[in-house]
Image (spheres, rainbow, N blue to C red):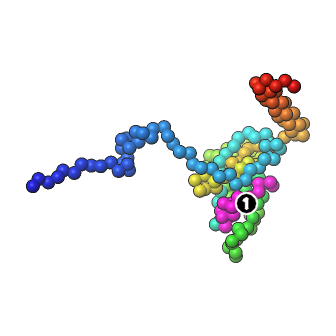
């Protein structure tokens, strides 16, 4: 009897181009779970630049954040001795934690590349810029902070922004009415 010749079967795990032919151009973006936003920051500051930073946390902080509990109300970031620290972020104690629970308002280290830290140091030192967290969110199981390099607004700037927003809202309403054929 002659021996059967085995033919190779592609299991889909090969690294060749044959397995990726049907998936060209399709990349799945990681799911984002927003924990907290700082809505007042966009009202009080002109946002110059934004950065995505990682955060150094302890276990009970992560569990409390997964429950959706956090507050960015009084939070800000500082640069001390070449490291970026997030201060004033309130993460309440984990409900199922015990003696291992964290203190709610402890300072937390932010993770950035060295060149980004150096750039931020120069920009914060030069003018009246500050570092404000805009959003806390999970990406692929890791907590990220959207940190903004911002300049404080004066009172008249805030009023001008409110006026501009209301004018834009009125314009879109009027355009919607005209499209629908409603006169008023």
Rendered location of residue 171, percent (x, y): 81, 28
Question: In the picture provided, is 6 more to the left or to the right than 129?
Answer: left
- Write the residue at 70% across / 45% down: 120
Q: Is residue 128 magenta?
A: no
- Write the residue at 77% across / 49% down: 38
Q: Residue furthest left?
A: 1
Please name whichever residue, 11 or 84, is drawn nearer the observer in this view of the structure.
Answer: 11
Quarter of the image holding residue 86?
bottom right
- Write the residue at 77% across / 54% down: 72
Rendered location of residue 124, percent (x, y): 75, 45
- Write the residue at 38% across / 44% down: 19
For the N terminus, which image quadrant?
bottom left
Rendered location of residue 161, percent (x, y): 84, 35
Question: Does residue 7 sit above or below 88 in this rendering?
Answer: above
Q: Which residues are magenta?
A: 60-75
Q: Is residue 70 magenta?
A: yes
Residue at numbered disc 1: 69
Tell me if I can see residue 36 in this picture: yes
Please name whichever residue, 143 or 21, is drawn nearer the observer in this view of the structure.
Answer: 21
For the C terminus, which image quadrant?
top right
Rendered location of residue 182, percent (x, y): 82, 25
Please name whichever residue, 144 or 53, is drawn nearer the observer in this view of the structure.
Answer: 144
């Amino acid at each position: 009897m002659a021996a059967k010749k085995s033919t190779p079967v592609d299991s889909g795990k090969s690294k060749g181009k044959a397995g990726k032919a049907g998936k060209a151009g399709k990349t799945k973006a990681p799911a984002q779970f927003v924990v907290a936003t700082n809505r007042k920051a966009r009202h009080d500051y002109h946002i110059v630049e934004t950065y995505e930073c990682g955060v150094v946390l302890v276990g009970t902080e992560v569990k409390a954040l997964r429950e959706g509990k956090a507050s960015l109300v009084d939070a800000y970031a500082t640069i001390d001795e070449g490291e970026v620290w997030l201060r004033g972020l309130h993460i309440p104690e984990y409900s199922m934690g015990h003696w291992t629970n964290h203190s709610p308002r402890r300072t937390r280290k932010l993770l950035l590349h060295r060149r980004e830290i150096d750039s931020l140091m120069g920009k914060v030192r030069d003018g009246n810029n500050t570092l404000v967290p805009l959003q806390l969110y999970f990406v692929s199981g890791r907590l990220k902070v959207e940190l903004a390099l911002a300049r404080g607004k004066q009172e008249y700037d805030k009023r001008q922004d409110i006026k501009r927003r209301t004018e834009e809202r009125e314009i879109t309403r009027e355009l919607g009415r005209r499209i629908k054929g409603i006169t008023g």
